[in-house]
Amino acid sequence: MRRVSSVTELTSSKIAALARYWEEKRGQRPMPLWRDIDPAEIKPLLPHLLVSRYEWNPFRVRYVIVGTWLAQFSGGDFTGRTLDELDFSGEDTDWLAHHQRFIAEGKPTFGICRFVTQSGLERDYESGMFPIAGENGVIERALAIEDWARGVDVLADENAVAPSPVPKG
């Protein structure tokens, strides 16, 4: 993942919309509580959302919500599964280290990720991850969003460029 310093460095209107919503819900606090989040208020974003809940002793990342669009593009719904159970080897990101850094920093993170298919097609996508506090004020969850509408597909073996498909929804 190539981290960027703010949502303004991304092209995704979906990530920008979630960033505005998160800011509104946090108010003057470092981050909102889970009870502050109302899915009905962000209905158009739901297919692109991913909610992770953190477990301690040992540290694990459990995916409690996987949007339908994300499940489709990642090859299946992994709701209820943990990061260590999944194979994200086609990604350029060490997701465990990313979650640990995210918790340590306690603020939203934004980035451009690269996914490589088994056939060698590379695809960039944009992501945003927002901390959600438990009742004790400590990060309990991550509210994340991915938008694959960025740029073009790259055929790694041939250095050729193919037009990106336009996702529906």
Image: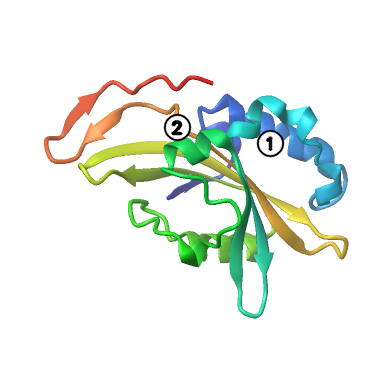
> Could you classify mark 2 by the number of other residues whose Cα lies within 10 Å: few (under 14), some (14-19), or many (20 or more)?
many
Secondary structure under the numbered disc 2 in the rendered image? loop
In front of the other: label 2 or label 1?
2
Which residue is under mark 2? 148
Q: Position of residue 136 (x, y in %)?
A: 87, 65
In percent of width and height, residue 38 lies at 81, 37
Horizontally, residue 147 falls left or right of residue 62, namely left
Q: Residue at x 80, y 53 (%)?
A: 30
Residue 44 lies, with reference to residue 46, above or below; the image says: above
Question: Tag 2: residue type?
Answer: Trp
Residue with the most extreme bottom position: 57
Q: Viewed as shown, does residue 138 lie left or right of 69?
A: right
Quarter-of-image position of residue 37: top right
The residue to which callout 1 is attached is 19
Which quadrant holds residue 74?
top left
Instruction: Report, in whole angstroms, how far the alpha carbon at label 2 lies from the one at label 1.
Output: 17 Å
Q: Amino acid at mark 1?
A: Ala
What SS does tag 1 mark?
helix
Of callouts 2 and 1, the N-terminal one: 1
The residue closer to the viewer here, 47 or 98, is 47
Res. 149 in view: yes
Residue at image coords 33%, 23%: 164
* Residue 107 in sight: no
Within the image, what quadrant is residue 152 found in?
Answer: top left
In this view of the protein, which residue sits in the foreground, 32 or 45?
Answer: 45
In the displayed structure, 34 sits above or below 18; it is: below
Residue drawn where x is 87% and y is 61% of the image: 135
